[in-house]
Amino acid sequence: MLITTPVGSREAVTAARWPVPEERRTVTVLFADIVGSTGLVERLDPEDVRALQQAYFGTVAAVLRRWHGVVEKYVGDAVMALFGAHDSDGFDAYRGVRAGLEIQAALDRRLPAGTRLRVRVGVATGEVLVDLAGTRDGGHGAASGAVITTAARLQEYAPPGGVVVCAATRRAVAGLVEQRPLAAMAVAGKAQPLDVWRVTGVARSRPARHHGPLVGRRRELATAGEEIARAVRERRPRWISLVGPAGSGRSRMLHELVRAVSMVDGVPVRWCVAHCPPFPDGELAPLADLVRAVAGLRDTHPPETVRRRLATALDGLLPAARRGAAADALAEFLAAPSDAGAAARGAEVCREVLLGLAAGQPVVVAVDDLDRAAPALNRFLHRLFATASERGLPLAVVATHGPGWADLLPGAAGRRRRVPLPALGSVDTGRLLRHLLDRAGRPTAPAAALLPLVGGSPAVAAAYATTPDAGGEPGGVPEPVRRLVDAWLARLDDERRAVLMAAAARGGDVPAATVDRMLGWPAGRAERVLRALVDAGLLRRTATGGYAVAEPAVARVAAHRLPRAVRAEFTRRLPDAGTVGAVRPAVRGPAGGVTTGRAPCPAGVGHRSGGGARPAPVPGADIPTPGAPATECPVAGVAPAVGAAAGVPAGGGAARGGRRTVAVAAEGRDGAVGRPAGASGGAPAARSISPGLPTVRPGGKRAGRPVRARPGVFPGLHDALPGGPPPESAGRVGPVGGRAPTDGPPHPRRAQWGRPAAAIGRAGRSLVTGRPVLAA
């Protein structure tokens, strides 16, 4: 049975190997093996066999290193590699699949003349126990788990020259690669056959589909739209950045902006949008898709059609003497975007085309996920912006990226606007959850129970809404959320990650002295690390002076990473604290709710809609089941007062000097939802920012007349949910026109928190929380 055998004892959780010698992690395992190697070796001279082996193993190892994989072992002619065991970027499964595809092509190029090898590749994703010290090339026994055996069996099932993946890997790479199902595979020891897919190639970057209403982003949408309108009216280019971490809905905001700003002052606006996939083939590859969109081309068009349509698109944009050569350069670029010379020539023509378009009508050049792109694409945008500024053209550049990515744009003082996407407030989060649950065909009652876990992230809300039983996942966290958290935890060094996991495992209010005892450190050592994690926004101070993990999803994943031996050591070092364990995974409760094993704790979120207040629940605190009676919360001590129509639990953190009850205004007939009364971090009254929507006062009272919209906000943009006000008719909306916003599955991004990017330097920010992340 092909499983990894650990080297050494797993029982030794000693101070020498402390703080955390091993962790439970979700990794992707790749197995590659030669087809018919026995017969091939029998026909060759021993010296030829040695040359062939060196070429094969050298080629495979080079490809794996290029995709940041770790070669764990060699088994005969088979190679086993791990992705995500040492570092994780949220795309571990994608890197493993891309490595498998590249191995096939690389062997054909690098093997000795006259030699052809066919290789089978199996890729599986699952949970393993990782020896942190052994996660290096040749670290035999670095990982242990059933997924290793699954990857080996998938490799045996793969066709020669093929890459086969399991169901978990397929979900992780959906939309990034082309896949087709194979017959289910029977595996000895497993009760049910495994669903198997074959990967046939890399998918073209396509924007995500979005349907339904927009929730909680009216002000951000209005701000970005007004900046584009200023660029058109003043004929001075402007640079607009939609900034938020993974899960905050950056791509969704760009989608809505394209729809909302289709014209300015009656003049149509031309949008040219490029999307940056992870690890693009070529530094300027996203521009190739932009050129296709401008010329109306598809990937399947033959070369003669491409050449003809490019020539037509250039008509009127370039001088007649240059059109032929320009069309040839663009056609060459589209055919081979990874060729550096072709890409440089094509980018130069593309820049002239965009400037030519802007000379005739307003143009917006948008790039989604610019922080994924190579520096060459950023330089292209800077040069385009500078040239348009010199010529006084009505052009705007819109870029989406994370808060830790700093773009230094020279010569754009006063013409640059960062639009942050903060965490959704509790009211908006509850509305979004109910909408997503309804669209997934699930009852909306669990929305109140899920609210504390979401933390204002649209992507996390979508993951929980589409996962019927998250309790069956490792740590009780859906796969997409776990990938985001894993990528964030990988940015912490061992010391800070150990402190965070210890706080998550202990749960609730954790004093610094308790962390010292858990980790076996001298008194006072943990205080420094805990304060640093608070400054980074990863922990929060409690009313008693202790510490708690700020994000519920992060707490669950971090606590689940601890193996049993470490948890047992924690228990031994805290004899008066009972058993220390990982956060209990959520299980199904009555009425479709979610609960854990203890009495429900109604600690909720009590901040204003659109705000960035941190959720009050802490790791280990149980989630209230909808309809359950009020129970004293051991952490915050708040009594729930939930508006039934809103489906949002009352909330509030631990208050100094006593407890408080927070009331949530229920939805009226017009669908308006009030903000919680007495919520921390904001004024006591809500404010309507759109004519026609009433102002909601604390306690559910509405003002007698609506409040006028502030200058610069699009009149008519509102959150149209089922049961709410009817959407505005499409067409012009104030001075900047367009269609009403829509909604759909939020792109996996997350909301922004914490300090500005300039304050954190190279450390970056959390992919999940948006807070600054300490450098490893």
Image: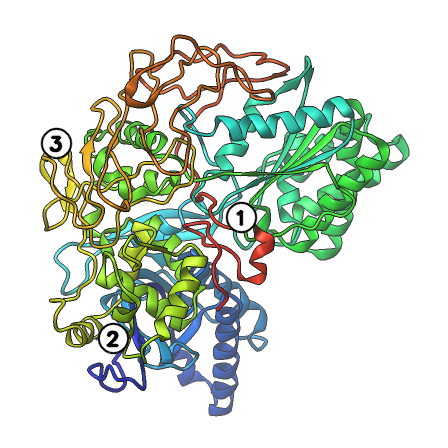
Say the numbered circle drawn on residue 340.
none
SS class of the residue under badge 1?
loop
Q: Mark 1, mark 3: which one is toward the viewer? A: 3
Callout 3: few (<14), some (14-19), or many (20+) C-alpha neighbours within 10 Å? some
User: Mark 3 or mark 2: which comes first in sequence?
Assistant: 2
Q: Position of residue 271 (x, y in %)?
A: 64, 29
* Residue that protrudes farthest toward the bottom in the picture: 46
SS class of the residue under badge 2?
helix
Q: Is residue 375 left or right of residue 530?
A: right
CA–CA distance between discs 3 and 2? 40 Å
Residue type at tag 3: Gly
Q: Kindly identify which residue carries mark 3.
A: 627
Q: Kindly identify which residue carries mark 1.
A: 402
Residue type at tag 2: Arg
User: Mark 1 or mark 3: which comes first in sequence?
Assistant: 1
SS class of the residue under badge 3?
loop
Is residue 566 visible in the rendered structure shown here?
A: yes
- Establish if 446 lies above or below 74: above
CA–CA distance between discs 1 and 3? 39 Å
Q: Are marks 1 and 3 in contact (CB under 8 Å)?
A: no
Callout 1: few (<14), some (14-19), or many (20+) C-alpha neighbours within 10 Å? many
- Looking at this view, is 491 or 116 the one in front? 491
